[in-house]
């Protein structure tokens, strides 16, 4: 039997502004139940280190702007959406179980590269050497212009 309250509930859940927070809540609960927070902690630490080294680089180059500062927030939101989506499609059995691990690994690799890049621009010589070797290997495989600096 369709009642006024069930129609209100349907209207509530059909509105996007409520779906996104609900998806985040349900995915968080899913992560809690599966105990799969280790990779999220690692990614969070990498993002934090990247943020700190990025701020240090910006201060050294004297090009610290609110736009560059806000990019971190956008990046974190995109990472969260990507992780939530990957976790949900794996939970719903749309993709193999390793899909979310692949995406977590990709995000970690991007953050590690960014940290090395920032460290190299700050004058950390081992980071310069590693970035140089990575760029040579990437160019051998047909990937060019990886550096964002």
Image (cartoon, rainbow, N blue to C red):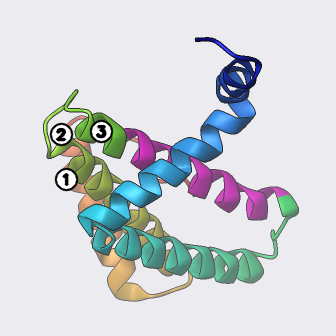
> Looking at the image, can residue 146 be seen?
no
Q: Which residues are magenta?
A: 67-85
Q: Which residue is mark 2?
A: 141
- Residue 93 is drawn in which quadrant? top left
> What's the mark number on residue 78?
none
Question: What's the residue at 35%, 40% (across, down)?
Answer: 88
Residue 34 is situated, as x and y percent measured from the top left of the image, at 25, 62
Check whether the beta carbons of the residues at disc 3 and disc 1 lie within 8 A of each other: no
Residue 31 is situated, as x and y percent measured from the top left of the image, at 35, 60
> What's the mark number on residue 137?
1
61 or 25: nearer the viewer = 25
> What's the mark number on residue 143?
3
Residue 136 is situated, as x and y percent measured from the top left of the image, at 24, 54
Residue 81 in the magenta stretch? The answer is yes
Residue 20 is situated, as x and y percent measured from the top left of the image, at 62, 39
13 or 145: nearer the viewer = 13
Under circle 2, the secondary element is loop
């Amino acid at each position: 039997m369709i009642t006024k309250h069930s129609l209100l509930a349907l209207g509530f859940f059909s509105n996007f502004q409520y779906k996104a927070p609900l998806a985040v809540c349900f995915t968080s609960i899913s992560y809690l139940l599966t105990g799969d927070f280790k990779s999220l902690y690692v990614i969070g630490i990498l993002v934090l280190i990247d943020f700190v080294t990025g701020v240090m680089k910006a201060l050294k180059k004297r090009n610290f702007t609110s736009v560059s500062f806000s990019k971190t927030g956008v990046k974190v939101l995109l990472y969260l959406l990507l992780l939530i989506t990957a976790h949900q499609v794996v939970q719903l059995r749309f993709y193999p179980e390793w899909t979310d691990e692949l995406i977590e690994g990709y995000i970690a690799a991007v953050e590690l590269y960014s940290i090395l890049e920032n460290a190299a621009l700050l004058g950390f010589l081992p980071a310069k050497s590693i970035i140089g070797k990575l760029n040579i290997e990437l160019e051998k495989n047909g990937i060019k212009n990886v550096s964002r600096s």
